[in-house]
Image (tube, helix red, strand yellow):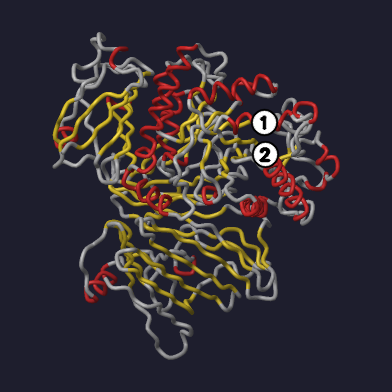
Amino acid sequence: MVSSPTLVHADPEGPEVAWPPVVRLLAAGEELVLDLPRDAMPRVLHWGSALGPLDVDDLEAMTAVSLAPLATNGVDAGVRIGVLPESGSGWTGTPAIQGHRAGRGWSPQLRPVDVQVDVLAGRGGRVAVTGVDVEAGLEVALEIEMLGSGLLRLRCSLTNDHPDDYALNALVVSLPVPSRATEVLDLAGRWARERVPQRRPFTVGAHVREGRHGRTGADAATVLTAGEAGFDFERGETWGLHVAFSGNHVVAAERAFSGERLLLGGELLLPGEVVLAEGQTYDGPWVYALHGEGLDAAAASVHRHLRSRAHHPTSLRPVVMNVWEAVYFDHDLDTLLGLADLAASVGVERFVLDDGWFGARRDDTAGLGDWWFSPEVWGDGRIERLVARVKDLGMEFGLWFEPEMVNPDSDLARAHPDWLLQVPGRLPVPARFQQVLNLAIPEASAHVRRQIVSVVHEVGVDFIKWDHNRDLVDAGSTVTGAAGVHAQTRAAYGLIDEIRAQCPGLEIESCSSGGARVDLEIIERTDRVWASDCIDAHERQTIQRWTSQLLPPELVGSHVGAGRAHTTGRQLDLDFRAVTALFGHFGIEWDLAAASEQERADLAGWVATYKRHRRLIHTGSVVRRDLEDGDVMLTGAVAPDRSEALYSVAQLARHVTWPQDRVRLPGLDPAATYRVVGVHPRGPRSASEDRTYPRWWWDGVRLPGTVLSEVGVHLPALDVDHACLVHVERQP
């Protein structure tokens, strides 16, 4: 298909202009076919794999056969469900626009007045349609874009063109999926156990996932996926939806009595949160749509998109040392200088000082919001000494902030109690002894920005761990009296943008009680997310596995914790902890002074292993497989040219049979020959006499890609909570 010019239709009552009845957007083997009627908003004829060559007659016939026959007791004209479903069409499911103007304008019926189409040959394209309802006094702008990665995204804005205010309750976009999508998969979770998969039949009605935390949420659906029965990482066609918004949001899978199946999503607006005066516009978030044969293929479209961004981190992701679980609030210069020395000795490249460095913050009850170095702990040049030592050792220096929160016991809260989000007459129920700072108040946002920028410049901060530790409940504005989550979320984006503009080169991590703010809008402003406060490698195997349905490994912080996990108490082998952490942005959160010399030596070996393979992990295609009924998990990274791959195989439960069957290594070139070898920093001396290891493990073996992918190889006989690492490299 050749690239076509932008096509515009400005006046439906005026002379005929170029307006294609059907538009095809294709990229990376994916296709969206849009019907662009003259009397209604766009309708999806096909979203899925590319259909191959089609001519104009084919597209016309495709439109004709897409119309269902009239059913008994249905509307006479038949219901045509568009990207913005309308009640006025006879649709009795969820309408796209929900709102009213003092009871009027509650059922809009939009007519297109402007259509813009830009088709890029094989690289996707964009369709923008403006629709109006003159009687309702509403104008809607809809954008639909197929990205070069094959990822689809949509967003919608609504403008009030009437003198009276319009109260908007909801604005969602929808995409149809075929009837062969019979199952629905999404994620649940809680603090320290984020992104737990759950699956159900795609039954009649709506499976609705609402996020009302004022942040993305540890229990967020993340990606709501509909697919063929039994779909998994490798097989079964899947269609998924993700709402790229860090505040309240909704995503749903809806099946109508008449057979239609839709995925829909958008921002979840609180009552009275968006009331538009004449001329005002509400801009909805991007909603991303993933399609693929298997979950890995769907995830790959997101990963390719993120990696194609100009601002995507492309430098080698540095090994991080965060001191939270080493010292907690007990900040002592000599202790931290010693930790810095030990961190450098094992190969750390970024040293992060966590909570407790500022104001009166000796525990979590006070000081939050007072962003200056505590004279008690870090005065008399002590912070400068620590930063100097860190940088002299060749490491970057990072610092923890929680800019959106305050303790009531803080100078900031005492000076500006009106800056706290609250319902008139009461403060929200406390959480972690803190309240939320209303960043939608310009003076409050400017105050925080000045403090953070000053600290960054004062000591040379290279990295910020940006935390967000409580839900936004009763989150009202003292300025407007209305709910304030929408404005707070937008203001938080603005604050991050301003800080980054004033601090070039600064990297930021999105942390929110661990993994409660993981979405594609926050990642536009940050360089990685903290997947969970739980560093227990057993739990992390699942957490990281499902985080990668949205984000590639280089954007997901993954650390080696202490032998006894602080959050669960589980005792785990260092090799298992390290192998688990490899498949992310690798780091350490462990009191290395309490580790033995042998443990530090072994850890240094794993750091070197990460450095040797990080480019492959952070550019390769993610592959995941559930083996032995899910008791064993395979995670891998395959180079874009399939020249090499690295696989982790982890035993998480005792299977009914043992040892496990041969493991197939997916993603390889079937026509190539590879050398397969086990990977361990200590080398063969540590296990050469261990009968549970196959004979070829340390010396390697040559095999065709077809054998590795279809037949597989026996790996070490693993015990529970142990893992092995396999490297595969193409041979001449």
Q: Is residue 126 left or right of residue 344?
A: left
Reply above or below: 362 against 601: below
Quick one: 82 or 589, which is closer to the camera?
Answer: 589
Residue at (56% x, 42% y) in the render: 517
- The residue wearing badge 2 is 402
**Residue 287: image x %, image y %?**
47, 55
Q: Which amino acid does label 2 sit on?
A: Glu
Q: Nearer the viewer, residue 356 or 241?
A: 356
Q: What separation in Å lies between label 2 and label 1 (alpha carbons)?
A: 9 Å
User: Left or right: 61 with respect to 258?
Assistant: left
Q: In the orientation shown, which residue stands out farthest toward the right? A: 415
Report the residue marked by disc 1. Answer: 355
Q: Place residue 626 in its image quadrant.
A: top left
Question: Is residue 301 left or right of 562 when viewed as pictured?
Answer: left
**Secondary structure found at label 1:** loop
Question: Relative to 497, is 637 above or below?
Answer: above
Counting the numbered discs, the total is 2
* Dot 2 and dot 1 residues touching (CB under 8 Å): yes
Query: What's the amino acid at mark 1?
Result: Asp
